[in-house]
């Protein structure tokens, strides 16, 4: 990994630009709630890969007219080891409870017939989990069929400047 400070808002702006055509095609609204001066220490290409995967899943598994949102916040305070929590939420089809424990396994896909039309391999989330752990982070998912999903990534926090910099 090539560690450097990564400006989160810029990272998500560039990812949104790349995913904009796919979202438009399905009339899905992409929303961003990422504070302006938030950095994390990480490998930019790998971080991009993590969130490209999560956001393209969110678009793929959300029906026409839905909503996909990224939010970031700093957790913890003072001397405690701080973390940044980044949440990718969609208003999509959701994931059945029985599948949730296996969703990060290689090649695992919910409902193969349904998923096949989206042309994936089932590797995306296993890569996301691996890359998150390389950054000493964690990932978990909350989901409800018919309502949507949230993928919650927590990464070590780096710095939070004032607007003057
Ligand atoms: P690819 O390797 O191209 O990413 P994939 O999208 O099928 O293929 P994963 O990204 O690993 O593979 O996701 C695994 C499965 O988890 C998907 O097939 C889908 O069934 C389910 N899934 C992932 N993200 C979501 C989501 N946001 N909403 C609903 N189901 C999802
Ligand atoms: Mg995928």
Image (cartoon, rainbow, N blue to C red):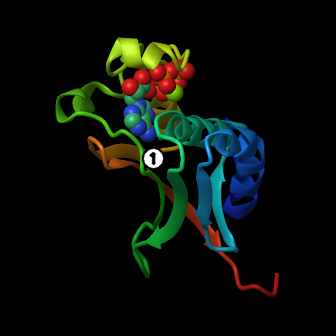
Tell which of 28 and 39 is nearer to you: 28
Horizontal side, residue 77 vs residue 19: left or right: left
- For the view shown, which residue lies furthest in the right direction? 165
Quadrant including the N terminus: top right
Residue 19's quadrant in the figure? top right
Q: Quadrant of residue 21?
A: top right
- Determine if residue 124 is in view: no
Classed neighbour count for the residue bearing mark 1: other residues with Cα under 10 Å, few (<14), some (14–19), many (≥20)? some
Percent x, y of residue 147: 31, 49
- Identify the residue at image location x=17%, y=29%: 98
Q: Position of residue 30 (x, y in %)?
A: 62, 55
Q: Does residue 17 sit above or below 102 in this rendering?
A: below
* Quarter the C terminus occupies: bottom right
The answer to whether residue 123 is above or below residue 73 is: above
Q: Tell me residue 94's x, y (percent).
A: 33, 40
Q: Secondary structure at mark 1?
A: loop
Rendered residue at 69%/74% (across/down): 36
Q: Residue at x 23, y 33 (%)?
A: 96
Toward the viewer: 164 or 109?
109
The residue pinned by badge 1 equals: 137
User: Is residue 118 visible to us here?
Assistant: yes
């Amino acid at each position: 990994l090539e560690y450097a400070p990564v400006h989160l808002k810029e990272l998500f702006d560039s990812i949104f630009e790349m995913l904009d055509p796919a979202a438009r095609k399905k009339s899905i609204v992409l929303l961003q709630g990422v504070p302006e001066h938030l950095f994390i220490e990480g490998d930019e290409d790998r971080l991009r890969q993590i969130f490209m995967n999560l956001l393209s899943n969110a678009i793929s598994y959300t029906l026409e007219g839905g909503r996909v949102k990224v939010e970031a916040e700093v957790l913890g305070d003072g001397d405690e080891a701080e973390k940044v929590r980044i949440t990718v939420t969609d208003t999509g089809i959701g994931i059945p409870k029985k599948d949730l424990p296996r969703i990060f396994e290689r090649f695992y896909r919910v409902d193969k017939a349904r998923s096949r039309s989206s042309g994936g391999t089932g590797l995306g989330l296993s890569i996301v989990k691996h890359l998150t752990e390389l950054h000493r982070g964690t990932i978990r998912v909350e989901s409800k069929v018919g309502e949507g999903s949230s993928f919650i990534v927590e990464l070590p926090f780096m710095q939070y400047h004032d607007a003057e910099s």
